[in-house]
Every structure is written in C-alpha cells, then in structure tokens.
Amino acid sequence: MENKVFISRVKILLVSAFLLVLFIGCKDDVRTLERMNYEGDELRTDGFYYCLRKNKHAPTKMLVSFFYRNGVYLWGMSFYDTIPAHITKDSILSFERLYSQFFDRWGVYQVSGNQLFQEFECHDGFDPRTHYCLTTSDIMNDTTFVYRDGYSDTIVYHFHKFDYKPDSTFALQWIP
C-alpha cells in the first residue's frame, strides 16, 4: 500500500516538473497576420457586422464587430437586443468605455479573394503565454460573411450601416 502511494506521488511530481519546464521554457506565440491597410471592397467599413447567438440558458444576444480601413477590427460587443436598428451611439459608447481599451478585443484582419482572415489574442485558462487565434470566414458579399468556429454551427454575420465607430487608435499602440 505504501509503495502505491509513493509511486503516485512520484508520478505527480514528475508531471508537475514537466509542466513547469514546459511553461517556463516556451515562448509566446507570434502573430501570423501582418496589419495592412484594407483598400478592398469585399467588406464594408461604414458600420458594423453582427450575428445573433442563441443560448439555451440566456436570452439571444447580438454580437457586434467593427472593421477599420487601417487593418484592425474590434470584436466582442454583445447586446441583448436582437434588432440592429435599436443599437444607438450611446450603447456603442458604453461598450467602448468598458472594453475598447482591452488589447484582446482588438485583432488584425486581411481579405484574400472571398476569404476573411481574422487574428486576435486568445487565452488558455492555465497557460500564461500569449496565444493568437486565426479564424477564416467565407465572404458571401460585402454585407454578409459566414464564420465557422469548429465548435458550433455556422455563424452568419450581416452588415448594418452605422455612423459611429469606436476609435481604433488604441489598437495601433500594440498592433504595429
């Protein structure tokens, strides 16, 4: 019995040591997409793209993303209103005050043909290193793109013209 306890403790110690070496010895990921000014017409930048996300434990949310001509995008805005026309400048300003200063809400995008590539900083709960997630969407037309995240069904984003956009200057401080 004592021998089994000793062996279990040694296994735990070895696994812990391996994980410690792994976390200390590994470097942060590097961004694979370069920020480039967007000069195309495959996507619109004079408003926002939104999708509706259903959740069986909460009301449906509208997720909103803004794309900028300087090659960055702001993502992660969520509203419990499902009608884009109900989104006001005040609601966007409220989100901007809360979240736009967080660097992980900003990403880089590029368009190639009918493909939209988006890269953003993502976090793995226990891993302190910086990771970048690269996603690909199919652009259907300048007002619709289809995102497949590999976990859920297809997510369709639609465009809504909007006069106000949060300032992207903050993002340029850490995205060269």
Image (tube, rainbow, N blue to C red):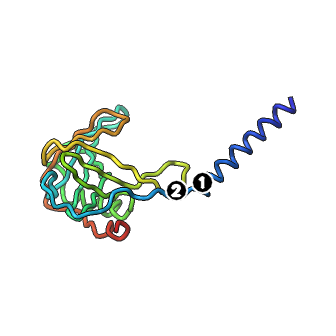
Label 1–label 2 contact, CB within 8 A: yes
Q: Badge 2: how crowded within 10 Å, few (<14), some, or many (20+)? A: some
Where residue 101 appears, x then y in whole percent? 36, 65
Look at the picture and state if 155 lies above or below 70.
Answer: above
Q: Quadrant of the C terminus?
A: bottom left
Q: What residue occupies the far top of the structure in this picture?
A: 1
Residue plotted at (60% across, 54% down)? 23
* Residue hosting label 1: 23
Task: Give 100 or 125, whichever is nearer the viewer.
Answer: 125
- Secondary element under disc 2, as helix, strand or loop, is strand
Q: What residue occupies the far right of the structure in this picture?
A: 2
Q: Badge 1: how crowded within 10 Å, few (<14), some, or many (20+)? A: some
Look at the picture and state if 142 lies above or below 163.
Answer: above
Residue plotted at (72% across, 41% down)? 12
Task: Give 115 or 150, whichever is nearer the viewer.
Answer: 115
Q: Which mark is residue 69?
A: none
Where residue 139 appears, x then y in whole percent? 19, 44
Please state if 49 lies on the left or on the right of 16 as rendered.
Answer: left
* Residue hosting label 2: 129
| Amino acid on which the number 2 mark rests in the picture | Arg
Q: Quadrant of the N terminus?
A: top right
